[in-house]
Image (cartoon, grey):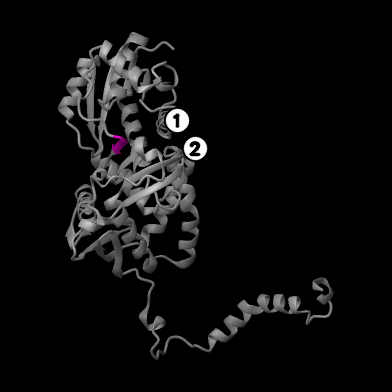
């Protein structure tokens, strides 16, 4: 492959620092190091300096926090996206945004190739590269982990020392982590044994249930068309609102998950996640839907959630099928406006109230007291018609119908 300029998705860690130097040597071309700020805690000045010192012709740091919340997190949560019943897609949602900005930079800077630091075993390589292809298939894609011979941490360290690349002297963590606004994930190392309980010191966004306040926290979230728009009566923009949900939920031990999931590439993987604000937001959103969405519309929408979530998890954010499903999901949200009251207590996220001008819940129909809008005798025919097939089936099994009794003898 002959390339003139490469844009590398760069974190400043050991892997991407080695990749940065390796790309410059291997391809003898200009390399731009690009980092995306999606809410992780980083020393961005240090990353910029390290990138330039390691050989980057330019270091570009893009603040994508607002876009991440508005264009990725909120659309997915309007759809109640959840993978394998529990994972709220924190990493999966971030990758297409990072890749999109990387392509924009490549086009602006006149690059003809993009690169990433994902290994050949994980999901991220698929997510990055499907996004590249889905946005600009003219760009060449370089995945060093699938081509070079630096296939161990020791070899990476030796390469770094040979090329005077600074290696952090901080104590190595017995696991890897990835953080953004939506969550922080932990995997590898000691967590590769699914019998090993995570160390309490590992958690960063949530307190333990044992250390959570002994008094519950109540809050009210207002939604409009499926998106949260205010907290406790205060109108807030998406980013500050979501950050506040993270704080409140984390302080009450909400959002921890220990999961063995199925990777797209075929293997099972154990991950530990903290998704405080997302867990709270999803529970509140589901509660509001119970009074604002028609039963049959809700059933059809729910039947699509698994497929929608799998598309995101597997890297197909920029696909026609995901875009089609998004339109369907958003259409269902036109009546999902109202207020939900939540009770947060020691890891529990409990709905204790919901109200909406679009509510389909009518107390005068549902009441157990006397009413003048519902004729209870109508239920007799309703039950008989719905029970007709059950009656025929029972008669058949009991042999009361002589024509078919012998079949069951």
Question: Which residues are the magenta region?
Answer: 174-178
Observer-nearest of 105 and 281:
281
Q: Are marks 2 and 1 in contact (CB under 8 Å)?
A: yes
| SS under mark 1 | loop
Q: Tell me the tag on residue 267.
A: 2
On the picture, is 400 further left or further right than 297?
right
Observer-nearest of 145 and 328:
145
Q: Residue at x 46, y 67 (%)?
A: 295
Q: Quadrant of residue 188?
A: top left
Q: Residue at x 20, y 50 (%)?
A: 237
Q: Residue at x 50, y 59 (%)?
A: 300
> Which badge, 2 or 1, comes first in the chain's sequence?
1
Report the quarter where the N terminus lies: top left
Residue 128 shows in this picture: yes
Residue 297 lies in the magenta-colored region: no
Residue holding disc 1:
121
């Amino acid at each position: 492959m002959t390339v003139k300029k490469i844009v590398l998705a760069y974190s400043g860690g050991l892997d991407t620092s080695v990749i940065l130097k390796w790309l410059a040597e291997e391809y003898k071309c200009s390399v731009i190091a690009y980092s995306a700020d999606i809410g992780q805690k980083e020393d961005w000045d240090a990353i910029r300096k390290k990138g330039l010192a390691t050989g980057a012709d330019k270091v570009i740091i893009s603040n994508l926090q607002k876009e991440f919340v508005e264009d990725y997190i909120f659309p997915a949560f309007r759809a109640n996206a959840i993978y394998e019943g529990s994972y709220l897609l924190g990493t999966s949602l971030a990758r297409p945004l990072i890749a999109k900005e990387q392509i924009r930079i490549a086009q602006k800077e006149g690059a003809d190739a993009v690169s990433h630091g994902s290994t050949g075993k994980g999901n991220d390589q698929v997510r990055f590269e499907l996004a590249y292809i889905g946005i600009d298939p003219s760009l060449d894609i370089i995945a060093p982990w699938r081509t070079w011979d630096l296939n161990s941490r020791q070899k990476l360290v030796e390469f770094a020392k040979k090329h005077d690349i600074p290696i952090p002297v901080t104590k190595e963590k017995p696991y890897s982590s990835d953080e953004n606004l939506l969550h922080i994930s932990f995997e590898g190392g000691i967590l590769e044994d699914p019998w090993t309980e995570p160390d309490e010191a590992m958690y960063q966004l949530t307190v333990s249930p044992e250390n959570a306040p002994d008094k519950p926290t109540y809050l009210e979230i207002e939604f409009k068309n499926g998106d949260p728009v205010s907290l406790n009566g205060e109108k807030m923009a998406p980013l500050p609102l979501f950050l506040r949900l993270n704080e409140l939920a984390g302080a009450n031990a909400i959002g921890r998950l220990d999961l063995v999931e199925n990777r797209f590439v075929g293997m099972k993987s154990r991950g530990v996640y903290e998704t405080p604000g997302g867990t709270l937001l999803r529970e509140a959103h589901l509660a509001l839907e119970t009074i604002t969405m028609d039963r049959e519309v809700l059933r059809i929408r729910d039947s699509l959630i698994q497929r929608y979530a799998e598309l995101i998890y597997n890297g197909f954010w920029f696909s026609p099928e995901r875009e089609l499903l998004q339109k369907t999901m958003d259409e269902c949200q036109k009546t999902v406006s109202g207020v939900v009251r939540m009770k947060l207590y020691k890891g529990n996220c409990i709905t204790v109230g919901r109200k909406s001008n679009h509510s389909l819940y009518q107390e005068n129909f549902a009441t157990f007291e006397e009413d003048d809008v519902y004729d209870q005798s109508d239920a007799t025919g309703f039950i008989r018609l719905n029970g007709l097939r059950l009656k025929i089936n029972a008669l058949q099994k009991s042999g009361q119908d002589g024509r078919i009794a012998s079949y069951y003898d």
